[in-house]
Amino acid sequence: MKEITIVKISGNIIDEPEKMAGFLQDFANIPFPKILVHGGGKIASQLAVKLGIKPNMFQGRRITDKATLDITTMVYAGLLNKNIVAKLQSLQCNAIGLSGADANIIQSKKRAVKEVDYGFVGDVEMVDVDLILDFLKLGLTPVFNAITHNKKGQLLNTNADTIAAELAVALAPKNKVNLMYIFEKQGVLSDVKQNTVIENLNMNYYLKLKQEKIIKDGMIPKLDNCFYALKNGVQKVIIGGENLLSNNKEKYTQISL
Amino acid sequence: MKEITIVKISGNIIDEPEKMAGFLQDFANIPFPKILVHGGGKIASQLAVKLGIKPNMFQGRRITDKATLDITTMVYAGLLNKNIVAKLQSLQCNAIGLSGADANIIQSKKRAVKEVDYGFVGDVEMVDVDLILDFLKLGLTPVFNAITHNKKGQLLNTNADTIAAELAVALAPKNKVNLMYIFEKQGVLSDVKQNTVIENLNMNYYLKLKQEKIIKDGMIPKLDNCFYALKNGVQKVIIGGENLLSNNKEKYTQISL
């Protein structure tokens, strides 16, 4: 049983070139095998504005029409993914950029229209674990963007936190998987003003803090992904800040059931 | 010794969705192992215009400043590459989209500044043949866009015809390689108005037609790539039109030394 580290890096860090450069150096330094998943950040929204396309958001999630999907595909799978891969290559990390369409490695299904039509948004249906392990055996470090496909020729935009969780769950049965969400805060905070990091967050405490609206908005789907991963065999799930990989004294939030 | 087919599809066909759909169906139908290389077409230039960036050309080649490189990376490695991969996946062709940065599969060097500074343009230095063969062994069909990198963190724009030729040459020592350039004409024409296809073009005939200015402009670097491939062990080099893969009665140009 191999130990595999999956790191999801959020858009807020991608948006700051210096922080991102430091993070990529840290990621290059952590032991192999490892997988990187990246979100999008502001570049896609900024490009949409420049092109006169207004980004639609609903409960912190992007509604993806055709024009937005094209922009997302350009920025996530093209500009960001290839620049991240090139930077990691310069740091002696043999990265390979992957969308879900590549080698049919993550297949998803367009989200059913209920209260909201999220547009070209895909929920993960299948992860090709064997192929990921083949790539790891070749010494490659997969770098996933948030674009997937439905195997019927349609690209779909998928939440990057969810991709990280689904990859972790798919690899969990035969490997010891550590899942790390790295974002602009140091962890899950009980007091944003005081920057008080909750060092251990279990399900009961999460439900309590959610009820008290201390945990809210975008943190809810992120934490739902964390608990989903733990419930499905992932060994360790952590939420932390940009220095987590290099500074072992830095506080972070460990999630437990 | 395996027989590998490398097909380069030009931007002029990519620009016409119906022709491109027909071509991808044909490509999906040809026997495995195979490799696709695609150029860019008008979408990158159109996006540049929309964003107020003027594309610079010199002797049929794009001069690539930082803004143009970003657009090229978005369109070639993102929008086009991932949509081509998703379409091929829907046609049961297990495609994987690759830039040269991915897995350090094509490493290039920024072109030296002489009369012209081509900007972020890379000339191929190294192709990782073993990794391409590993991917083919996994049943994957590589789909290369024209973005490469210098292994120092810099993406570079490389001529797609050249990428196809360099891939063919790299694979030639241990494999029987067929290289096909597919573009908007039926082959190399001796008379454009009459659409007269030259069915066999050898080096002497090429030099004669070049002197007579019957072969000119963008056809010169394309043909130079063809002869480079043949001189370096590639078995068969063909230039043909969009129906070449499906219609065995269609005329085309076979290049020979």
Image (cartoon, coloured by chain):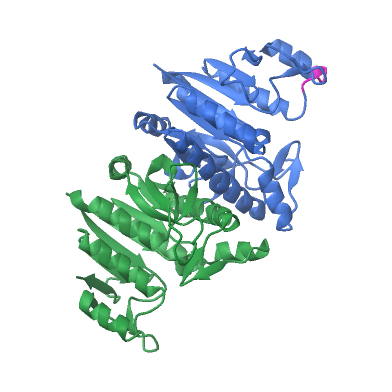
Chain colours: A blue, B green
Residue B101 percent location from the top left of the image: 44, 44
Q: Quadrant of residue B145?
A: bottom left
Residue at 65% of width from left, 55% of height from top? Answer: A67
A146 or B129: nearer the eye? B129
Q: Image check: A54 left or right of B144?
A: right
Kindly give the residue lying farthest to the left in the view shown: B1
Q: Is residue B2 visible?
A: no
State the count of labels: 0
B138 or B249: nearer the eye? B138
Residue B46 percent location from the top left of the image: 60, 66
The boundaries of the magenta stretch are A211-215
Residue B218 percent location from the top left of the image: 41, 73
Q: Image check: A239 left or right of B198?
A: right
Residue at 57% of width from left, 20% of height from top? Answer: A246
A234 or A41: nearer the eye? A41
Kindly give the residue lying farthest to the front in the view shown: B114
Kindly give the residue lying farthest to the bottom in the view shown: B194
Question: Is residue A214 located in the magenta-colored stretch of the structure?
Answer: yes
Our reading of the magenta stretch's main secondary structure is loop
B60 or B22: nearer the eye? B60
Q: Image check: A119 left or right of A125?
A: right
A46 over A28 or under it: above or below = below
Q: Quadrant of residue B210?
A: bottom left
Residue A210 percent location from the top left of the image: 77, 19
Q: Is residue A26 visible?
A: yes
Question: Is residue B4 located in the magenta-colored stretch of the structure?
Answer: no
Q: Image check: B42 left or right of B130?
A: right
